[in-house]
Image (cartoon, rainbow, N blue to C red):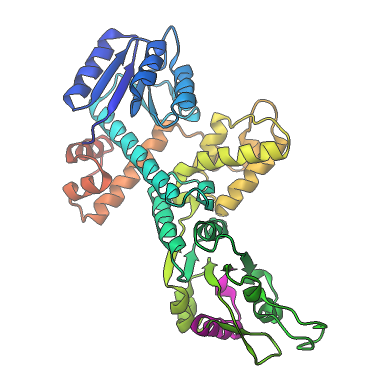
Amino acid sequence: MKTATLVIADDETGQLDALAGYLKKRGHRVFKASGGRDALDAVRLHDPDLLLTDVRMPDLDGISLLTAVKKEKPDTGVVVMTAFGSIEDAVKAMTAGASDYLPKPVDLDHLDLVIEKCLDRRDLERENQVLKEKLDGRGGFSQIISASPAMAAVLEQAVSASRSRATVLILGESGTGKEVLARAIHLAGPRRDRPFIAVNLAAIPETLAESELFGHEKGAFTGADRARPGRFETAEGGTLFIDEIGDAPQAVQVKLLRVLQERTVERVGSAKPVRVDVRIIAATHRDLESGIREGRFREDLFYRLNVLQIRIPPLRERREEIPLLADHFMRIYSEEESRPSSGLSAEALDWLSAYDFPGNVRELENMIHRAVVTAGDDGIRVEDLDPAASSHPFQVKPVTLPEKVEELEMRLIREALAAASGNQSEAARSLGISERHLRYRMKKYGMK
């Protein structure tokens, strides 16, 4: 088990002493605070990894303490302890930035689990920060919100890709941010001062795709009244991002293969090769291997493109990033629309977290933009996010925070057990918890 520096705030002396004694035995460095103001002083003095605080305290309540700590020490995790069944306090705390919450009286096994989870999240965030710092702060990676292991892996792959000249193939559903990642790779690499040119093959008529990519000579076809360089020549020395490569016509695929092999292009209507120095990043939402089997995509081109492959997971597989992304877009569009940022209601945040986002990050961005424009002074409601929400009972059905936590824990446990062929020790290791904790959670949820 990981050990950490902890500050515990509770005006109930018995509870405070019991928790502090238990956590010291678990190897943690613990500082006690009998109220909110004492806790804030302790956080300033000891710079803990984690603050555990009661909500109801006479001098400074837990939510106010949480807000103050997040303002002064944003990297400090905060776990709020709430009276059993007080979901309203828990929702307020999570909305204000708490890492997690614990119902009182505190279950010690649950306490260990929450601390481990918070420390794992802290380590992940620090790893992500290290990855971004490796890019000297000059890349676009600082604009990519990452709070999940899946996106941490994507960033790590992108860091490696930024240092290389190799072709990159980015896979992912529509709206996951493939162009954003491609631009970040370009800005983080040695070609950052040269052009980044993006072309979406799905948006170009098939008859014009060749001319758009490779250029044409005067008179090459009807309407070609002058010679025109293509996107490859325009991107000279930089990066050409070819989006929706899976929609490339066969003739374009043949010419792309030649560019990748020989580093030359031929304009439409010319047999004279033009040498180009361009780094290619391609992307698609399509299954290219199925396209190969069905004869729609060249196998040799696929292998030329698939030197470095990065797969961006859909937003529904990284739900922990939804509140962060929503907040990011709220700040952007509140400024753009000159409207005060009124924040999300607890019901709206709950609805967003339960929604599957078939359009991924792009859909969330558009949803937040609309909500910022239509919301009143009392904050963004579910109806602002989706005007038709009232006709979708499943989507607006209230889901309590404990239910969401339990659902996530059960899903992760099932996946870990399946991957470990039922071996509980191996499953516990993959989850980053002890086998005792795993057995406790399985028993709690009635899992065999």
Seen in the picture, residue 241 relative to 158 is either above or below; the reply is below
Residue 305 placement, left or right of 174? left
User: Residue 298 or 215: which is nearer the viewer?
Assistant: 215
- Residue 387 visible somewhere in the drawing: no
Seen in the picture, residue 16 relative to 176 is either above or below; the reply is above
- Residue 330 visible somewhere in the drawing: yes
Percent x, y of residue 252: 60, 82
**Residue at the spot 53% in from the left edge and 71% down from the top edge:** 280
Q: Considering the image in quadrants, where does the C terminus appear?
A: top left
Percent x, y of residue 182: 53, 61
Query: In the current view of this chain or complex, which residue is farthest to the bottom?
Result: 271
Q: Main secondary structure of the magenta part?
A: helix
Percent x, y of residue 162: 46, 61
Residue 125 placement, left or right of 391? left
Residue stretch rendered in magenta on the structure: 241-262
Q: Is residue 275 magenta?
A: no
Disc tally is 0
User: Residue 93 or 341: which is nearer the viewer?
Assistant: 341
Seen in the picture, residue 248 relative to 399 is either above or below; the reply is below
Q: Quadrant of residue 209?
A: bottom right
Residue 392 placement, left or right of 88? right
Percent x, y of residue 441: 25, 37
**Residue at the spot 69% in from the left edge and 86% down from the top edge:** 268
Residue 404 placement, left or right of 8? right
Q: Is residue 261 magenta?
A: yes
**Residue at the spot 24% in from the left edge and 18% down from the top edge:** 20
Q: Considering the image in quadrants, where does the N terminus appear?
A: top left
User: Residue 193 or 54: which is nearer the viewer?
Assistant: 193
**Residue at the spot 52% in from the left edge and 53% down from the top edge:** 139
